[in-house]
Amino acid sequence: MKIAQQLKAKNIAEYLIYMWQVEDLIRANGCDIDKIRENIISRYPEEEHTALEEWYGNLIEMMRTEGVKENGHLQINRNIIINLTELHGELLASPKYPYYSAAYFKALPFIVELRQKSGKKDEPELETCFEALYGVLLLRLQKKEITTGTAKAIEAISSFISLLANYYEKEKKGELEIE
């Protein structure tokens, strides 16, 4: 919970990937607060247990209510993609951010390829990017090999998403001027 709060304040992209991990952790524990208490919460200091139990309990309830117990993402996480997509469009339309546009167009061939391979051609581009980043994170956690082609794609996508996250933070602080 503290990690989520810190990431949300510092880096929206890392926060979103973290929250996707939390969704998967909840699923891996059968959306069962008792299992989460045993397998996750018990590893934290005692004084954090009550707050963590409430946080995980709320997330479980949201997952049940929103029908994402098996797969998919919570609306709070989908809203981040929506907000980032709006900002993305504004940044691309503005002549003030050529480096952002360059990073996007460098990543675009990989995004298109990933969307074709996944069969999710109607999926928002940014969701494809986050799925790629999350997929590589899972591969690394499993200590599986990442091909040169995948590494090259992830490098371009990561640079693009990193720029977008930085602009998102600037926008939140009122430091971003878009024409």
Image (cartoon, grey):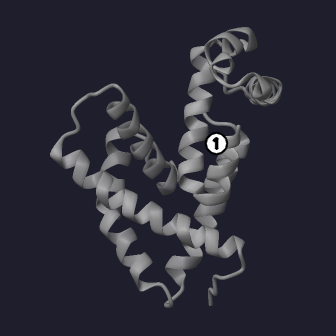
The residue nearer to you, when weighing 27 against 141, is 141
Left or right: residue 32 versus residue 133 is right
Q: Position of residue 24 (x, y in %)?
A: 56, 26
Instruction: Name the residue carrying label 1.
Output: 3
Left or right: residue 74 versus residue 163 is right
Q: Residue drawn at (70%, 48%), measured in percent from left and top?
A: 5
Q: Is the residue 30 above or below the residue 56 in the image?
A: above
Residue 169 seen in this snapshot: yes
The crowd level at tag 1 (other Cα within 10 Å; few <14, some 14-19, many 20+) is few
Residue 65 seen in this snapshot: no
Q: Is the residue 86 above or below the residue 36 in the image?
A: below
Q: Residue lying farthest left?
A: 148
Q: Position of residue 49 (x, y in %)?
A: 77, 23
Res 139 → quadrant: top left
Kind of residue sitting beneath label 1: Ile
Left or right: residue 52 versus residue 146 is right
Q: Residue drawn at (69%, 37%), measured in percent from left and top?
A: 74
| Rendered-image quadrant of the N terminus | top right
The residue nearer to you, when weighing 34 against 117, is 34
Q: Residue drawn at (26%, 28%), measured in percent from left and top?
A: 144
Identify the secondary structure beneath mark 1.
Answer: helix
| Rendered-image quadrant of the C terminus | bottom right
Q: Residue drawn at (74%, 26%), measured in percent from left and top?
A: 56
